[in-house]
Image (cartoon, rainbow, N blue to C red):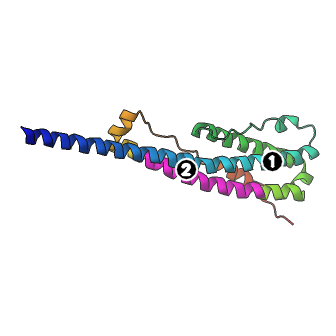
Amino acid sequence: MSGLLIALIVFALVVVMWFIGESNRLNRYQVMIEESKRTVDITLVKRYDTISEMLKVAKAYAKHEEKVFSELVALRQGASIQESNQVISNQNDVLAQIRAVGENYPELLSSNQFLALQKEIADENEDLAASKRIVNSNISQINQAIVTFPTSIVAGIKGMQQVQFLLEDTQGKKDLSDLDYEIH
């Protein structure tokens, strides 16, 4: 009887140690997502600042287009994945509106300052895309762990669910490729 009791205690300890190990692994994945998400936040802040500068330049050319210039949504650092997707979408909308204003003011599109800002936005979009790939890779790791047996048991006990991916940014790429002018 004591041999069976020892075997049950050893088995229980193995199960507890396994549970703790898997729980810690899931926690590390969450930390990796948060750390990589900070890079996206930093890139969005830079992009926000550049868009703000573009708006200032555009305002000088199109003073009566106030509607466009008042719609840039403030960026919140540490936003959730859904909020980050919305910030990116809002920034893309503003860039599209600036482009529309630029079509009415060709001298704006040929301004050296505006052209430099366009190049800066293009660079920031590349940085953003790279940052999003890293975040989505980390999200993929945790999502795979959450749905894989037996780790799914630990995830279920912890109340963890799959994490939403950052959306691919096709609008920003399209708008900026249309704005690609040669800088002199």
Label 2: state its secondary structure.
helix
Instruction: Give the percent coordinates (x, y) of residue 184.
Output: 87, 66
CB of mark 2 within 8 Å of CB of mark 1? Answer: no
Q: Is residue 91 left or right of residue 28?
A: right
Instruction: Give the percent coordinates (x, y) of residue 126.
Output: 66, 57
Q: Which residue is mark 1?
A: 99
Q: Which residue is mark 2?
A: 135
Residue depicted at 32% across the width and 42% down the height: 19
User: Within 10 angstroms of label 2, few (less than 14), some, or many (20 or more) residues?
Assistant: many
Nearer to the camera, 2 or 74: 2
Answer whether residue 52 is magenta in the image: no
The amino acid type of the residue labelled 1 equals: Arg
Instruction: Give the percent coordinates (x, y) of residue 38.
Output: 61, 48
For the N terminus, the quadrant is: top left
The amino acid type of the residue labelled 2 equals: Val
Label 1: state its secondary structure.
helix
Magenta stretch, residue numbers: 120-143
Residue depicted at 88% across the width and 36% down the height: 66
